[in-house]
Image (tube, grey):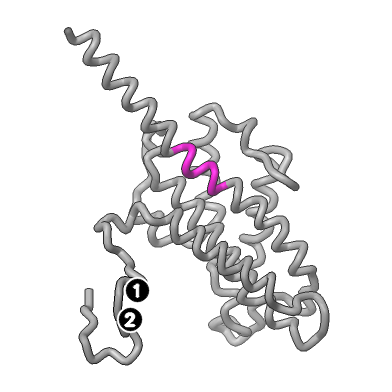
């Protein structure tokens, strides 16, 4: 990994303790939920400050908003798949494949398997999501709009065609409201799975020690 130097014009340190520090805990593979939350917060900040759904000249403002929400969703799904909660599965997914993929439809089934193994499917609900099937429907719809996380980053694809279909019309505010509910649900789920697996692991150790006496 390249190191920055004191001559950097961009990565300049402020005097005193108030600087941004990244990858300081030597466990970047455990930071997916933190990255997801950061992108979600950025999306909500844009929604709160842009003139979305109000006038024609603001239409393109939707693109970074949708991208940030889509990226946050991908990160939350990866956080669950790569987190300790996945230890409950008989066969864990290959981390290298998870790192490479941008496919929401490859990640969601693994998340659903993890949640099902914990017996938490009835709890996977939020505003606009009555059950797991509804969550699948929302994720599938967003995947169809942007299967490779490219569509809202560029006006055209690699073939020079429009990155989204002609006259794609929707309310960005309604989109954001639904995505906020979904991302909050996944954030809660990611941390709860980590905690539950920790409790179960500790209980298993104590049980083994008890019966091993």
Asked whether 16 or 57 is in front, the reply is 16
Could you say which disc has been placed on residue 93 in the image? none
In the image, the segment drawn in magenta is: 186-193
Q: Main secondary structure of the magenta part?
A: helix
Drawn side of residue 126 relative to residue 33, left or right: right
Is 71 placed above or below 138 here? below
Quadrant (top left/top right/bottom left/bottom right) for the C terminus: top left
Q: Is residue 191 part of the magenta span, yes or no?
A: yes
Percent coordinates x, y for residue 91 in the rendering? 37, 36
The mark nearer the N terminus, 2 or 1, is: 2
Percent coordinates x, y for residue 180 in the rendering? 65, 56
Q: Residues within 10 Å of mark 2 (few under 14, many from 20)?
A: few
Q: Which residue is mark 1?
A: 19
Q: Is residue 135 part of the magenta span, yes or no?
A: no
The picture quadrant where one finds residue 69 is: bottom right
Residue shown at 66% from the left, 82% from the top: 162
Residue shown at 38% from the left, 25% from the top: 200
Drawn side of residue 127 relative to residue 155, left or right: right
Percent coordinates x, y for residue 117 in the rendering? 49, 29
Is 136 placed above or below 58 here? above
The picture quadrant where one finds residue 177 is: bottom right
Drawn side of residue 134 relative to residue 55, left or right: left
Q: Residues within 10 Å of mark 1 (few under 14, many from 20)?
A: few
- Do callouts 2 and 1 mark residues in contact (Cβ within 8 Å)? yes
Which secondary structure, mark 2? loop
Q: Which residue is mark 2?
A: 14
Quadrant (top left/top right/bottom left/bottom right) for the N terminus: bottom left
Which secondary structure, mark 1? loop
Asked whether 182 or 165 is in front, the reply is 182
Question: Distance between the Cα atoms at labels 2 and 1?
Answer: 6 Å
The tally of labels here is: 2
């Amino acid at each position: 990994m390249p190191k920055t130097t004191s001559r950097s014009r961009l990565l300049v340190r402020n005097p005193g303790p108030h600087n941004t520090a990244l990858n300081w805990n030597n466990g970047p593979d455990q930071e997916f939920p933190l990255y997801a939350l950061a992108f979600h917060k950025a999306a909500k900040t844009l929604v709160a400050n842009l003139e979305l759904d109000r006038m024609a000249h603001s239409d393109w403002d939707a693109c970074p908003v949708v991208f940030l929400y889509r990226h946050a969703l991908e990160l939350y799904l990866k956080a669950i798949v790569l987190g300790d909660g996945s230890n409950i599965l008989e066969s864990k997914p290959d981390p290298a494949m998870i790192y490479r993929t941008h496919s929401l439809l490859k990640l969601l089934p693994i998340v659903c398997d993890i949640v099902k193994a914990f017996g938490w499917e009835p709890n996977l609900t939020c505003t606009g999501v009555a059950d797991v099937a509804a969550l699948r429907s929302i994720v599938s719809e967003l995947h169809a709009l942007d299967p490779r996380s490219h569509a809202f980053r560029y006006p055209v694809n690699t073939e020079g065609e429009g990155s989204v279909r002609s006259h794609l019309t929707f309310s960005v505010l309604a989109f954001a409201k639904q995505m906020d509910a979904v991302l909050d649900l996944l954030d809660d789920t990611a941390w709860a799975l980590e905690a539950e697996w920790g409790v179960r692991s500790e209980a298993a150790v104590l049980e083994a020690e008890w019966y091993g006496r």
